[in-house]
Image (cartoon, rainbow, N blue to C red):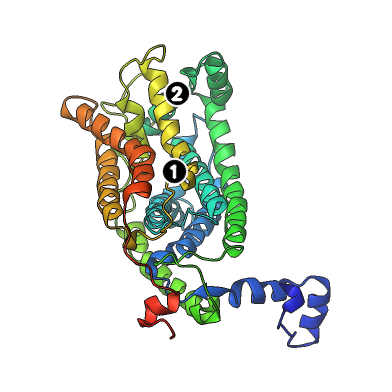
Amino acid sequence: MSEHSTYIPGNAVEKWLDDRLPVVRFAKEHLMDFPTPKNLNYWWTFGAILVMCLAVQIVTGIILAMHYAPNVALAFDSVEHIRRDVNGGRIIQATHAVGASMFFAALYIHMFRGLFYGSYKAPREILWILGVIMFVLTMATAFMGYTLPWGQMSFWAATVISNIFSAIPLVGDSLKQLVLGGFAVGNPTLNRFFSLHYLLPFIIAAVVALHIWALHVPGNNNPVGVEVKDSRDTVPFHPYYTMKDLFAMVLFLIPFAWFVFFAPDILGHADNYIMANSQVTPAHIVPEWYLLPFYTILRAVDFNVLFINSQLGGVIAMAGSMLVLLVLPWLDTSKVRSGAFRPMFKWFYALFVVNFIALMYLGAQPAEGIYVTLAKICTAYYFIYFLVVLPVLSRIETPKPLPTSISESVLGKADA
């Protein structure tokens, strides 16, 4: 707190600023000198990597918006114009397109790290909930961005996903018309998606600020899940973790740059390089890879349950797959945070990771034959893991003994 601050302005200008707007004091106390557990590993660097990715997406997105034309007659050609005629346009467009995939790669790693190490448990429930909100907002932003090139996959993905709204009882058709701006995907739809795609990253940035604020109240979780006992368990965030985060960012930028310079289109679908045509339906409509697990869950429910038809059931399942993450802190009631000390949990968690990758794979396959059966099995385990496995394990599992402090886990002795 500032009343216990050790910050002393270094010169007259700094003192003048500190008396009026203490930003340097704030940075010193809450960023540079923030006491951070000394045992954080490289899985913890993905938070900083995500902030970097968000900044890259916002900057490149603003530049692209200067040249993009949100009109169904001009959108496809304007993207080609950016790639071919705008100075540096090919690199900027490739960075933005590849950046979306890299953003989600880091985001999934960040979330799976939180799931393994119990970063959602008390007192960090709000921190986790804000993270899930960011995840949902990011998926919405990415989907809308996918429609903007106005290729075949853009148009038909928008058509398929917008039909989700019509499945909602009573208000579904009205919602669908509101989203589309009419009765079918067209010019008003593209304008709406462009506006929201431009706006949402700034909302995400605001939620990131709340996320970081929520992190600084209870402090970081750590690999052993033991709370900080005293100052011997921590080190200042700067320079120890700023340097670690910067090193991880550089490593992350290596594959990022490889994709941008050598294979900028490899992560996209070939059909999206054909201009949108409402009269020609692609053989197989698929979203981007990072949305595939939830697309699989949407498609997996192809049967009626009582008064709920298959279309509404799929929508409920997809929405539930995200909403269940919000209540996760109250589903897993084990007193031990870190999965490293939970032998049974490790196996179910590993199966969950494999299951999630399988959902991703199945979303890219046609909804026929064995793929349909596997999609149902994987969707079932997704929900069983959260609603059955975690609550039951919390009651029956016997965890390994925890170290008495972070120092003991690092140095191997209690009084280090």
Which residue is farthest bottom?
11
Quick one: SS at disc 2?
helix
On the image, numbered disc 1 is attached to which residue? 331
Query: What separation in Å lies between label 2 and label 1 (alpha carbons)?
Result: 28 Å
Q: Please identify the quadrant where the N terminus is shown.
A: bottom right
Residue nearer the viewer, 34 or 370: 34
Helix, strand or loop under label 1: helix
Count the labels in the image: 2
For image coordinates 45% across by 74% down, the residue present is 405
Three-letter amino acid code of the residue under disc 1? Leu
Read off the residue under disc 2: 164
Of the pair 5 and 140, the residue shown nearer to us:
5
Tell me: residue 353, above or below residue 369. Answer: below
Quadrant of residue 376 in the image? top left
Amino acid at dot 2: Ile
Callout in the foreground (2, 1): 1
Q: Position of residue 208 (x, y in %)?
A: 57, 55
Q: Is residue 282 left or right of residue 57?
A: left
For this orientation, the residue located farthest to the left is: 370
